[in-house]
Image (cartoon, helix red, strand yellow):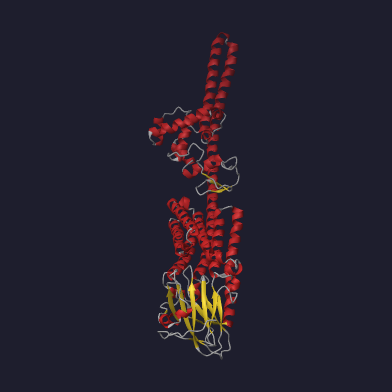
Amino acid sequence: MITGAASFPAFAQKVVRVNDSIAQHIFIYDEVEVLRDTTNQLTFKQITSRPYADQFRPSTVSTPQTKDLNAAYWFRIKIRHNSKADKKYLLEFFDQTIDDVTAYLPQKNGRYQVKHFGDRYDFEHREVHHKNFELYLQNDNDEAQLYYFRFKSSQISDAIMVLRTVDWFISYALDEYFYFGIFYGMILVFSFYNLIMFIAIRQKQYLYYVLYNLSVGFFEMSTDGIAYQYLWSSASEWNQHAYAFALYSTSIFALLFTRELLHIKVRAPQLNQLILYVIGIRTALFIYSLVFDHSLFTYKFVEFIPLAVAFGAGIYVYAKGYQPARFFVLGYSFLFIGFTLKLVIMIGFSWLSIGVIGYYSLSFCFVLEMVFLSFAIGDKVRILKHNKEKVQSQMIRQMAENVKLKDHLNHQLETKVEERTKEVFHKSLIIEAKNAELVAANDRLLQQAEEISRMNTLLEQDNQELQTNVAKVTRDRVMSADLDFEEFSKIYPDKESCNLFLSDLKWKDGYTCRKCKNTHYYIGHIPYSRRCSKCGYEESVTTYTIFQNTRIPINKAFYMIFLIYSTKGKISSHRLAEILNIRQSTCWTYGSKIKLIMEERKTILKKANKNGWSQLVLD
């Protein structure tokens, strides 16, 4: 007990009355008087003496803050008791981050009872086992008495003081813990679901999202006192800095999740570099604060930078047409608003923190952001599935068109062959008739035997030449050697049809990853590419082909290979340049490469079928 000293307020401090009809009352503005002790040496006896009592000033804001971390703050409130009140009352302090509070509670006999509380004390030290700080009020007289509180904290804290009935406190506390259960339950459910997705699909975005959600939950539990109550109630030193670890991991995993979900590395390389720089700088700051200066942890507003980078990246990618970013931007909009509100409150607009919505605004925004980020992941999966189905549909249509074209060409070739066969058969009948005549004439004209023999020899030569011509025509049609570029373009009209042909040719025997030898894949980000489901290596359709890194339009490169192959390499670069409308030097360079491959694979090409030119494509 401390003997009460006479206090002489210089201002008429507003008195808060105990009234059974009012369940709670929050002390604001001139109901709270403040004295800043820059020396940290003032005693209770001193501050209740006239020189210092006159220095107390009414609060000019709704919620006073301990902004000067090197000073101690004295607060006093005035309560008029009501001994006839039926209900019991307590004083509650909302901010769970206050390190040390010394409370001087007036007694009926004029003395003061001293109590200590704060998050530097073990949780079991508290008078009421609740996440906030509570002190029972001794409402045993009808006097107006002054209550004094000395605040000392290593971070900016709010002096939110509330007079409540015990009944109201129990009711509100039960509701609050119920909503906390819903909030943290949502975090666990979302995290567990995305962890299952990561195990099933092995995409890092799910793992980063799980770690991000758990970091958010860790931060919220650290700041609202739930973690101190249930997880580390005896680790007061760790409780001082747990929130800093949570904030750091939240920022890092938020940036990693953003980078992975929106494919920043591919879609915005410069933004990707910025994200990596921010991660590096944030990590360096965290390590420096941890090793050298713990007071830097109190500058929570630095998290505004990683948040702004992630938010800006989402807006940029969405503006570039990437649809899955829409829910990402919407979710981060709510988080950005909540964080901005907290930042504005921190820099001086403390009147915004009045009420449950203001105090828990960031938590509400975290919930909304978590929901919309889940929508963003689902939307990405839906769009990828839609694109896959669209590509498959296009492949099926193209295959059907290719079959039609193949059947049409085969029908034309069969018609030509049939016509030539009939012509050869007709000539054969004529030759046979002539042979019969010659044989008959041989019996009659022995003297003409030598002439007939010579004529037979000539006829046999004509027959062989005719058969040779028929074979040449047939081979030319099979090899399509007489196709010009316009006809060739009907088979391979554009880049997509060429890529489809390359895809079918390249993986006709099945897919095998060149990095890890895995045989399972997903559709890649580039059309017709394939992405390994195990290591993530993506291989484009032109990689490891003769078309890799070529700057010639791929359908013209197809035709150049066809021309060189069909002419056995005898066509000149000048002729190629004239046909393809490409510079002669380019035709010479690319043609030399093709001829070199033809020379290396001449044994294979001899055994090739009508599509033998395709043997030159793959490296």
Where's residue 144, x and y in %?
49, 88
Residue 4 x %, y %: 50, 84
Against 100, residue 305 (above or below) is above
Quarter of the image where the N terminus is located: bottom right
Viewer can see residue 182: no
User: Along the line of sight, which residue is nearer the eye, 474 or 399?
Assistant: 399
> Quick one: 352 or 210, which is closer to the camera?
352
Q: Name above or below for residue 155 compared with residue 403.
A: below
Which residue does the image show at 49% across and 36% down from the upper left? 546
Horizontally, is 353 left or right of 400 in the view? left
Snapshot quadrant of residue 52: bottom left
How many numbered marks are there?
A: 0
- Residue 127 x/y as whole percent: 59, 77
Residue 501 higher or lower than 223, as above or below:
above
Res 447 seen here:
yes
How far from the left and from the top, in percent, is residue 554?
46, 40
Q: Which one is in front, 135 or 186?
A: 135
Name the residue rendered at 57%, 64% in the picture: 187
Say which quarter of the image contains residue 107.
bottom right
Which quadrant of the view contains residue 440? top right
Q: Is residue 571 above or below residue 361?
A: above
**In this picture, residue 199 sits left or right of residue 300:** right
